[in-house]
Amino acid sequence: MRHDIRVVETKALNAWPALQQTAHDGWLLRQSKGYTKRSNSVQPLRTDPGADLRAMVGYCEDTYHRAGLPTIFKITPLCESCGLDGRLDEYGYAAVDRSQLLVRSLDDMQAAPPLEDLSIDTGFTEAWMSAAAVLLSLKPEQRETASALLTDSPLRRAFFLHRSGYDPVAIGIGVVDDGYLGLFDIATSPAYRSRGIGERLVGHILRWGQSRGAHTSYLQVVDGNLPAQRLYAKLGYEKLYDYWYRVRWP
């Protein structure tokens, strides 16, 4: 099954929101008090032929400067035709966090393997956020921003939390949008890794998404995260495209 990169990018943007978002000539400028690059970066979804890139970049720089944030651009194959990546390199923007977007079909899903003490909530809960703060090592201000980002959404979502007694072991989020299931914030406690817990957790998220009409799952993984890449390859995910960020710190 072929996938339209613009469609998948749009689904990912819908699934992981921003506190503030404005559109400028086909680019989305997202701001969320600095929490995660995907919620605090320029997302060029479309660039008109002959566009004045210097002027557009300057507009973005002014916008983020007023917000007290660094200017960050997400570079995907949607930017190739206009040469934005090369221009940003000329302007002194460094390439960071090289990553991959992976996809897999849900047509051949098997039954999810058992995972005891797994809670699945269809709305954001403080219990999930408390576990996420531990497993993702969130600072108090990051936890506050994450809570604001995740509290409400028009999309169908589920928050997965696996515990051992009172200890959080693994977390994840599944978001379904018109046939696409996005996976976010998949994390396992270091003390419980190499036990197959992450694989079983993802299996439950995939089954949940399939039962809600999803035909395809996608997720994002950093190039340097080799254990995660091995896990997702085992689960049948394949790379759809590479992406990275361009950053020039103030």
Image (tube, rainbow, N blue to C red):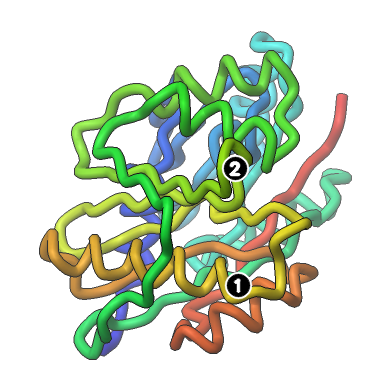
Give the camera-side residue of 241 and 159. Answer: 159
Give the secondary structure at mark 1: strand
Q: Residue at x 45, y 22 (%)?
A: 126
Left or right: residue 163 versus residue 229 is left
Q: Which mark is residue 168?
A: 2
Q: Dot 2: within a 10 Å radius of its alpha carbon, few (fewer than 14), some, or many (20 or more) residues?
A: many
Locate residue 68, reporting x and y percent: 73, 12
Seen from this angle, which residue lies furthest front? 165
Q: Dot 1: within a 10 Å radius of its alpha carbon, few (fewer than 14), some, or many (20 or more) residues?
A: some
In the rendered view of the protein, which quadrant contains the C terminus? top right
Image quadrant in which you'd find residue 69? top right
Left or right: residue 177 versus residue 129 is left
> Which amino acid type corresponds to the residue marked 2 in the rendered image?
Pro
Against 119, residue 83 (above or below) is: below
In the rendered view of the protein, which quadrant contains the N terminus? bottom left
Note whether residue 214 is visible. yes
Image quadrant in which you'd find residue 106? bottom left
Q: Give the residue number, with chain letter if any, for mark 1.
A: 242
Residue at mark 2 to residue at mark 1: CA–CA distance: 32 Å
Locate residue 129, reporting x and y percent: 52, 28
Against 36, residue 70 (above or below) is: above
Image quadrant in which you'd find residue 113? bottom left
Give the camera-side residue of 246 and 142. Answer: 142
Give the secondary structure at mark 2: strand
Left or right: residue 149 versus residue 132 is left
> Which amino acid type corresponds to the residue marked 1 in the rendered image?
Asp
Foreground label between 2 and 1: 2
Locate residue 23, reporting x and y percent: 39, 30
